[in-house]
Amino acid sequence: MEYRKIGKSGIVVSRLGFGGIPIQRVDVREVRPVLDVLKDGGVNFIDSARAYTVSESFIGEALKHDRKDWVVATKSMARSYSDMARDIDISLAELQTDYIDIYQLHNIKTEEEMDKVLAPGGALEALVEAKKAGKIRAIGITTHNKDLLKKLLAAYEFETMMLPLNLVETDKEDAFINAKDLGVGTIAMKPLAGGFFGESQEFPADVALYYLKNFSAADVVLVGMAEVNEARQNLEIFNSEVDLAAKVEALKEKASFAAREFCRRCGYCQPCPVGIGIPTIFVLETYYDRYGLPGWAKERYKNLAVKADACQECGLCESRCPYGIPIRRKLKEVHRKLGVE
Ligand code: SF4
Ligand code: SF4
């Protein structure tokens, strides 16, 4: 396993990191076995978020006996001083620790949000205060928008940044290189494009991860894991000399075409005011189109309480989607495919 000093923080992290989203769907007792496999393989980095329901508390439970062996990062969507100060204390309690290595402003989406967190009385003030008090060691930023990231890094000396990077979002490579030039630690999220890679043999996860491993400007590659087998497979890429370079370019070309309107299932478009489960509906489309399960997909769609045709075209979801997916048009297409009896 390769290690990096992340930015100017002095914190040493493994290149492969554990992403804390998927453990929301398992039992708390299943978390530690995954971490044991990762620890044996040299992983020391864990990322969670206040927004990931039980994730922080499951991690806190799992790290009861060896907290100090791990670099723990988490994040909050709080935008004001008081909300962030409260969230830092909640994170500390949920993670059962008296310090958090990296605390991040989670998913800054607009310039208005940026201005709010940076202004007096904004969330950054609470993070700075918490750092002085020893509650956190470093302050980071996460976003899906590389232009906004540039402005954020110019406005404040964040120690880390987190941005999606994968074979269908290679346009963000320059943002990683620029951040490294500024001395900022870089964390790549969504290396499998929200499950796009690894769902079929056509788009293999090992090649997608190999691309990230070899992209030197990403200090940490954060992979969501909830099963021991996933941990072993991911370690295989980061701990072996396997050479998949010849396959990367071909996969990039194929994937960029296939994923133009691919929903990353991030859920940022939710909630919809009329209750449409947008990512769920797009997942059913994937089963219909790509997995050869059209009957199953149609049956599942039929049982949804709110279907795509309930859309009132308010556009709220599209304003929230960081990938610019034309959700309204796609919902109509999916309904035409799956809604017919
Ligand atoms: S445009 Fe349709 S799907 Fe999107 S939030 Fe509005 S009602 Fe919901
Ligand atoms: S439509 Fe966009 S915001 Fe919604 S889950 Fe998919 S990628 Fe995320």
Image (cartoon, grey):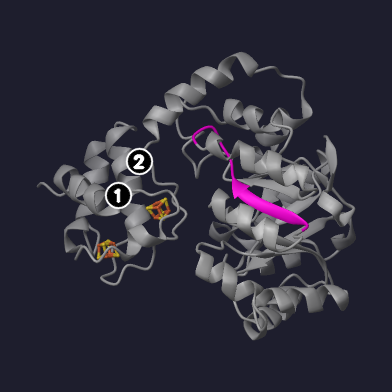
Give coordinates of residue 169: x percent, y percent: 52, 38
- Element on which disc 2 rests: loop
Q: Are marks 1 and 2 in contact (CB under 8 Å)?
A: yes
Q: Is residue 262 left or right of residue 326?
A: right
Give coordinates of residue 250: x percent, y percent: 50, 17
Sooner in the amino-acid sequence: mark 1 or mark 2: 2
Q: To which residue does mark 2 refer?
A: 261
Q: Quadrant of ligand 1?
A: bottom left
Q: Amino acid at mark 1?
A: Pro
Q: Amino acid at mark 2?
A: Glu
Q: Which mark is residue 20?
A: none
Q: Residue furthest top?
A: 246
Q: Quadrant of residue 141?
A: bottom right
Q: CA distance from mark 1 to mark 2?
A: 8 Å
Q: Is residue 226 visible?
A: no
Relative to 233, residue 100 above or below: below
Extent of the magenta region: 159-168
Q: Is residue 215 left or right of residue 183?
A: left
Q: Residue furthest left?
A: 341
- Element on which disc 1 rests: loop
Q: Which residue is at a point 77% across and 40% down the rendered structure image?
A: 15
Viewer-nearest residue: 29 or 316: 316
Q: Is residue 299 magenta?
A: no
Relative to 12, residue 133 above or below: below
Q: To which residue does mark 1 refer?
A: 326
Quarter of the image with the N terminus in it: top right
Viewer-nearest residue: 300 or 94: 94
Instruction: Estimate how packed mark 2 is, as few (under 14), some (14 to 19) or many (20 or more) residues with alpha carbons within 10 Å.
Output: some
Q: Which residue is at a point 38% across and 28% down the rendered structure image?
A: 257
Viewer-nearest residue: 289 or 171: 171
Relative to 98, residue 141 above or below: above
Q: Which residue is at a point 86% across and 53% down the rendered structure image?
A: 8
